[in-house]
Each structure stands twice: as C-alpha cells, then as structure tokens.
Image (cartoon, rainbow, N blue to C red):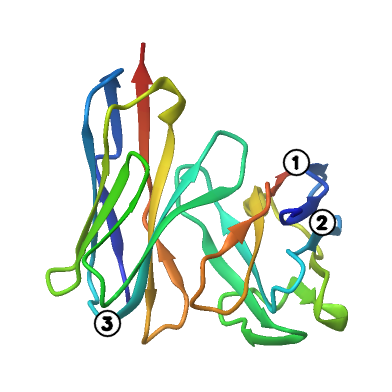
Amino acid sequence: EAGVVQSPRYKIIEKKQPVAFWCNPISGHNTLYWYLQNLGQGPELLIRYENEEAVDDSQLPKDRFSAERLKGVDSTLKIQPAELGDSAVYLCASSLSKTDTQYFGPGTRLTVL
Amino acid sequence: KQEVTQIPAALSVPEGENLVLNCSFTDSAIYNLQWFRQDPGKGLTSLLLIQSSQREQTSGRLNASLDKSSGRSTLYIAASQPGDSATYLCAVFGTSYGKLTFGQGTILTVHP
C-alpha cells in the first residue's frame, strides 16, 4: 500500500514569492492534516480536514496561508507571500479518523531567502 | 493548554543497552498517546499507540507504558541497535483540544 505522498520534497524561494505544497493521502483515509515542523521541535498542527471540510484551522495564519482539499482526496497548502520565518518542514499526514494512528509523508523542506 | 515534555533531549548509548525514554504531559484528559520515530530528513513513523484505558503496548523490542493520572509515559527499547538511532517523539491526543500535541523529541544515538 502506498504511503502519504508529498511534493515537492524541497523548495527554495525568495521572500514575498508564492509557494504551494501538494499532498496525496493514503487511499480511504478521510482525515488529512497539515503540520509545520521547525528544527528541533515537534510538529504543530496547521489544519485538519474531515473529507473536504476544514474542521480545525485555528493555527493557520489566514492572512498568508490557505489550503484546500478538493473532492476529499488530495490537498494543497499555499503561502502567499512567503516570509523568512516560514522556512520549515511542512508535513502532511492522514488517518482513518482523528483518533486513529496518523501516517506521515516525507515532508517538504521550505527555505525562504 | 496541553504541554508535552520529553526527557532527555538527547541520549547516546552503546549497542546492546536497554534504554528508557520519558514523556510527560500536563492535561490528563487524553484519548490516546502515540510514540513516533523520525529519521533525519524524513517524515514520522508511528511506533505504538496506547489508548487512555490501556497501561501498555508492545511491539517487538519496544514497550510503551502509560500512567494517565500522573501524566507520564515511557518508551522502553530493549537490546538497542545502531539502526534504532533516530529522534523519538511522543504525542498526546487531548479530548479537550481534539488534536495531537507533540513533545520536542529525544535524539537517540546507538553506537557500535
């Protein structure tokens, strides 16, 4: 069974530029998460989807971040414009439900110059 | 606010040793606790999930315990191997917050 797929794996951009990350969850997983992980820290939840509905986006900086999950499968996280402080690893995860084991993708390492 | 703390921050042991990683959390109203492993430049891999009603879970050389009332969990690794070298993360799913809250991790190095 394929795991959670993320692309790109690495992205380097200039500040103020837009950037987008893509995630394909495990087939059949209704719940999808985007996390932010800074160096030496544990992941922090940005947004959680139940099917195509965003049910927890309280930690998503909505002035510059946006996300969507079309048809309840793939998801895209966008930052526009990017700031230096956005440099981090962005992880996508999926699970059968919010209390089940979460399966993580390899992450996208973003560097903002 | 739920806070999760892991001790020690880093640990270096010789191959073959048994070791214990510690995790504590401030809010005991949890649904479950999960231990993850993260290799450098990779995502997280789930190791064990303990429901709040359980005391421990075992998988191979790994054993995780949970004492919900005192807000503590331990991950015991038996007969450590160099391939166990990674960062180990503890996370609790709080009933009040409805999400996983992670600790900062313990960096484990097992040298031959």
**In this figure, which residue is indicated by the disc labeled 3?**
B29
**In this figure, which residue is indicated by the disc labeled 1?**
A113
**Is residue B8 left or right of A56 when viewed as pictured?**
left
Label 2: element kind: loop
Q: Are marks 2 and 1 in contact (CB under 8 Å)?
A: no
**In this figure, which residue is indicated by the disc labeled 2?**
A16
Q: Which chain does tag 3 point to?
A: B
Q: Position of residue B104 (x, y in %)?
A: 38, 50
Residue shown at the point (37%, 25%) measured from the top left = B109
**Is residue A84 left or right of B98 when viewed as pictured?**
right
Residue shown at the point (33%, 39%) measured from the top left = B61
Quarter of the rendering containing residue A61: bottom right
Q: Amino acid at mark 3?
A: Ala
Work out whether mark 2 precedes mark 1 in sequence or the reverse, and give the earlier one: 2
Q: Which chain does tag 1 point to?
A: A
Residue shown at the point (28%, 30%) measured from the top left = B11
- Which circle, 3 or 2, is nearer the viewer? 3
Residue shown at the point (21%, 66%) measured from the top left = B55
- Which circle, 1 or 3, is nearer the viewer? 3
Which mark, by number, is residue A34?
Answer: none
Gap between marks 2 and 1, in whole Å?
10 Å
Quarter of the rendering containing residue B23: bottom left
Quadrant of the rendering where the N terminus of chain A is positioned = bottom right
Crowding around mark 1 (Cα neighbors within 10 Å: few <14, some 14 to 19, many 20+) is some
Gap between marks 3 and 2, in whole Å?
41 Å
Q: Which chain does tag 2 point to?
A: A
Q: Amino acid at mark 2?
A: Lys
Q: Amino acid at mark 1?
A: Leu
Q: Nearer the viewer, residue A60 or B101?
A: B101
Q: Is residue A11 above or below residue A83?
A: above
Quarter of the rendering containing residue B56: bottom left
